[in-house]
Amino acid sequence: MRLLRRNAKYLLVFLLAVGTWAAVYGYDKGFSQKWRSLIMEEFEKRGIEAQIGKLTIDPIDGLVARNVKIFATEKRESVVASINNVTLDIDLAKLLRKELFLNTIQLRDADISLPIDPASPETERLEIKNFSARIQIPGNRFEIEQAECRFNGFKVTLVGSLLRPRSIDTANDHQPLLGQLDMIRKRREILDLVAREMRRCQSIGNRLPHIHIKLVGDLEHPESIEAILDLNASRLIRDNYQCENLYARAQYRHPDVFIEQVKI
């Protein structure tokens, strides 16, 4: 019995050492191209053309895709977003049955880079830092449970429900694709103007101005996406003017923005 206990102790230490080595190796070296291909194929089935630079096991977060690029089409000529890390929740049983196995996408303090003109490699970019979000993928939808970041001195939160796009046949849909890229460019130019105005504002105290956005629509038809925006701010300074309290609500329905309420 004493010998058995001694051997069990050594076996436990050995298993812990092997497990630690596997975790460190998985984090540092990443998985093989085969696993990355499986994940990218899953994204493609969800209507997303993605390229994963590295797939690792993180001791805390679990399965993490790093240096992820999102493309407009399967030709991968136009990058619409770059994300430094994405945590993936997968169902291994569904993976073995060759079913859709990705349950949840989670971002923790991620950095996102959005080219203003996805068709131009030299375009300026919108940089979003410390972005956190949890996105459920039931069936054909993306359910954004909660997304949050700090952007140009503002706290921004986001919730929404979006129909996922189908895979794009670039051979037959060249003209519609150009229209979508042009729409992305126009929207991001507006967002860039808003970002510039946000940088001109400062808040006094510890409470950041808060923008809450709710989205609903179909990613395959971006013109259908509607948004409701609520802004709450106190002691907000812009140039030589100070606003003690500000509340505003606006609604976006392509191509118009409706200002529904403002209180100053």
Image: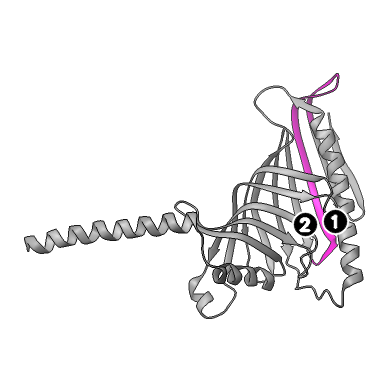
Kindly identify the residue that appears in the image at 56 percent across and 72 percent down: 34
Give the magenta range.
220-246
On-image quarter of the C terminus: top right
Query: Which residue, as the protein is rendered here, is positioned at the far top?
Result: 240
Name the residue at 74% across, 51% down: 214
Q: Label 1 is placed on what type of residue?
A: Ile
Which image quadrant for residue 8?
bottom left
Quick check: 257 above or below 12? Answer: above
Specify the quadrant that holds the N terminus: bottom left
Q: Is residue 141 above or below residue 210?
A: below
User: What percent of the width, then of the height, locates residue 143?
Assistant: 66, 60
Q: Which mark is residue 25?
A: none
What x and y, as percent, mark residue 47?
72, 70
State the residue position of label 2. 80
Q: Nearer the viewer, mark 2 or mark 1?
A: 2
Q: Amino acid at mark 2?
A: Val
The question of residue 131 being in magenta is answered with: no
Q: Are marks 2 and 1 in contact (CB under 8 Å)?
A: yes
Q: Residue at x 76, y 69 (%)?
A: 165
Q: Mainly helix, strand or loop, the magenta region?
A: strand
What number of labels is visible? 2
* 54 and 254: which is toward the camera: 54
Q: Quadrant of residue 156?
A: top right
Sequence order check, earlier mark of 2 and 1: 2
Q: In 3D space, how far apart are the residues under numbered discs 2 and 1 (Cα atoms)?
A: 9 Å
SS for tag 1?
helix
Residue named by callout 1:
184
